[in-house]
């Protein structure tokens, strides 16, 4: 019976995925990793009511991805061995996306790269991740560029130094010179790209595990819009995302949760080391991105550079 840990589990896609996983016979228990203890407990009570599982089936740990101290405390608080790790939590970072955390990492990279990487590495080091664990990192279509909102990431060099500049807010790439809206979306895209490359490298380093980067897709009715810059919120970003569903450019959280479930449970459709995202710009079937963008997702040099940079930053 699998012990599953889900980050960002108290609401939205993370919560719905927990509910779906609770109905699977192969699920032994679920750990909800959340920033707020009260919200985590509230989510557990709601899951008990909705799934019929006993309260003992669920447990919670505190986790703030923007703090390496919090990540390490989370690792220490996890008991037993984790068989499935769903790294769902992330975010755009709002107007403060490039502000440095106390660890010297930009908020957008802490939320989408280093926090998840530190949790994975910490569980590995503590021997709390099963030898044949399934690990799914929540990537995004924006990691490959989503015109006209963001450009395809083009790293100035395929080396550790270049990757590090993004993590610490001193990129040599061009998005610093863009208008504020484009700067936010492009910095988010680069963060998701580095996170995806890091976990692709982890798959190569840990061949007994199945490690996949997968996008939940363009999803409306989540808290993601709350993490956008104020100007985007004032323009009704949440409503726009909902309206996009009527023209096939977004979907409901339940659809996103099912995508996670398919990746977690259907190994033949989600082989280790792949980056799965929509076949269309915003929507579509989950497909391997490497044949379409080999310069990014079939590039071992980039994967190794991302891993070296991330590991160095989180080791401080």
Image (tube, rainbow, N blue to C red):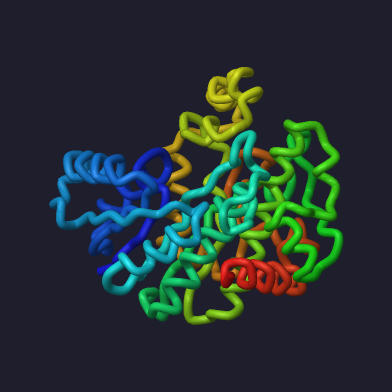
Q: Quadrant of residue 313?
A: bottom right
Q: Is residue 143 left or right of residue 250?
A: right
Q: Position of residue 196 (x, y in %)?
A: 63, 60
Q: In this view, does 51 lie to the left or right of 186?
A: left
Q: How many marks?
A: 0
Nearer to the camera, 229 or 141: 229
Residue occupying image coordinates x 60% and y 69%: 273
Q: Position of residue 44 (x, y in %)?
A: 23, 46
Against 137, residue 174 (above or below) is above
In the picture as drawn, the residue positioned furthest to the top comes out as 235
Against 11, residue 71 (above or below) is below
Q: Is residue 57 left or right of residue 38?
A: left
Q: In which quarter of the image is residue 40?
A: top left
Nearer to the camera, 250 or 105: 105
Q: Position of residue 307 (x, y in %)?
A: 65, 71
Residue occupying image coordinates x 70% and y 74%: 304
Q: Name the image quarter holding the N terminus.
A: bottom left
Q: Name the image quarter holding the C terminus.
A: bottom right
Residue occupying image coordinates x 76% and y 35%: 182
Nearer to the camera, 98 or 231: 98
Residue occupying image coordinates x 78% and y 48%: 152
Nearer to the camera, 242 or 111: 111
């Amino acid at each position: 019976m699998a012990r599953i840990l889900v980050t960002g589990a108290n609401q939205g896609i993370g919560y719905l995925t927990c509910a779906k996983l609770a109905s699977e016979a192969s699920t032994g228990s679920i750990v909800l990793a959340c920033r707020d203890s009260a919200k985590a407990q509230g989510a557990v009570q709601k899951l008990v009511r909705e799934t019929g599982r006993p309260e003992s089936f669920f447990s919670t740990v505190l986790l703030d991805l923007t703090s390496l101290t919090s990540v390490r405390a989370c690792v220490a608080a996890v008991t037993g061995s984790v068989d499935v790790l769903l790294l769902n939590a992330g975010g755009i970072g709002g107007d403060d996306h490039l502000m440095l955390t106390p660890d010297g990492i930009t908020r957008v990279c802490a939320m989408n790269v280093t926090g998840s990487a530190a949790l994975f590495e910490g569980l590995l080091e503590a021997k709390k991740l099963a030898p044949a664990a399934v690990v799914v990192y929540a990537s995004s279509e924006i990691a490959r560029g989503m015109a006209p909102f963001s450009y395809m990431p083009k790293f100035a060099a395929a080396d550790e130094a270049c990757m590090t500049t993004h993590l610490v807010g001193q990129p040599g790439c061009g998005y610093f010179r863009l208008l504020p809206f484009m700067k936010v979306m492009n910095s988010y895209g680069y963060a998701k790209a580095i996170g995806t490359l890091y976990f692709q490298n982890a798959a190569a380093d840990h061949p007994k595990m199945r490690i996949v980067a997968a996008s939940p897709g363009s999803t409306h009715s989540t808290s993601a819009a709350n993490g956008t810059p104020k100007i985007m919120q004032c323009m009704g970003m949440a409503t726009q995302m909902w309206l996009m569903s009527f023209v096939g450019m977004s979907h409901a959280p339940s659809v996103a949760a099912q995508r996670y479930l398919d990746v977690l449970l259907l190994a033949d459709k989600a082989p280790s080391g792949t980056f799965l995202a929509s076949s269309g710009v915003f929507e579509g079937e989950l497909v391997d991105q490497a044949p379409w963008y080999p310069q990014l997702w079939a590039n071992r040099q980039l994967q190794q550079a991302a891993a070296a940079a991330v590991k160095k930053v989180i080791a401080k």
